[in-house]
Image (tube, rainbow, N blue to C red):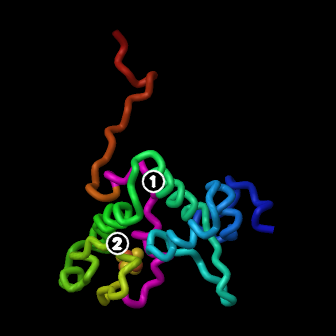
Amino acid sequence: MANSVPDNQIDYYEPIMSIGMVAQKLNVAVQTIRLYEQEGLILPFKTASGRRLYSMHDLTRLHCIRKMIRENGLNLQGIKRIFSFIPCWEFKGGLDNDCLNCPAYYSAEGPCWSLSKKGDKCALEDCRSCKVYRLEFHCDKLKEIIFGHERPVQNKPSEKSNP
Ligand code: SF4
């Protein structure tokens, strides 16, 4: 069974957790997870029968969403706006005419994967498999994702120059 797989032995992107398991891990109601999906913050995998499944990557994003709500006082509209600032074109080969004609380039309504209209490059792509949706979503990496800010590599103690 999916919940018998240790967290460190699973494919990070493999959808293996039910909505009930995810809700339990986050200590929220199942309806809360559904609401995040309705708002376009998360895209669960759907089986042929319509059952929703979530990966560890989804769970990381959900942790970030919960953190922004509980610790930063953001509401869902605010989080959608923040996600809309992700420069998806930077991760899809750079700005080109397709991007300039894509609603995601201009819209601040929500993340690109939540928009009903997409540019030609994305129209046929499964967003769950896209490198943009698969960006690492720890909350402390948001500036890195949005603005490309990279943290300087810290010297390890053994690499510091001797006095
Ligand atoms: S394929 Fe989906 S997630 Fe990827 S850039 Fe396009 S809309 Fe965004």
Query: Image quarter for residue 26?
Result: bottom right
Q: Quadrant of residue 137?
A: bottom left
Q: Residue at x 30, y 73 (%)?
A: 109
Q: Is residue 50 left or right of residue 118?
A: right
124 is within the stretch colored magenta: yes
The answer to whether 94 appears left or right of 17 in the picture is left
Residue at the image position 40 percent from the left and 78 percent from the top: 114
From the viewer's perspective, is residue 95 above or below residue 152? below
User: Which percent across, then down, holds residue 9?
Assistant: 70, 57
- Which residue was labeled with disc 2? 110
Quadrant of the image where one finds ligand 1: bottom left
Crowding at dot 1, Cα within 10 Å, few <14 / some 14-19 / many 20+, comes out as some
Does residue 114 appear in the picture of this structure?
yes
Q: How many marks?
A: 2
In the displayed structure, does residue 76 sit left or right of residue 152? right
| Residues shaded magenta | 123-144
Q: CA distance from mark 1 to mark 2?
A: 16 Å
Would you say residue 16 is visible in this rendering? no
Kind of residue indicated by mark 2: Gly
Residue 81: image location, x then y, percent: 31, 65
User: Compared to 90, does 73 lie above or below?
Assistant: above
As helix, strand or loop, the secondary structure at mark 2 comes to: loop
Indicate the position of residue 4 as horizontal and vertical percent values: 80, 60
- Residue 131: x and y in percent read 43, 70
Mark number, residue 48: none
| Residue type at the position of mark 1 | Ile
Q: Which residue is mark 1?
A: 69
- Secondary structure found at label 1: helix
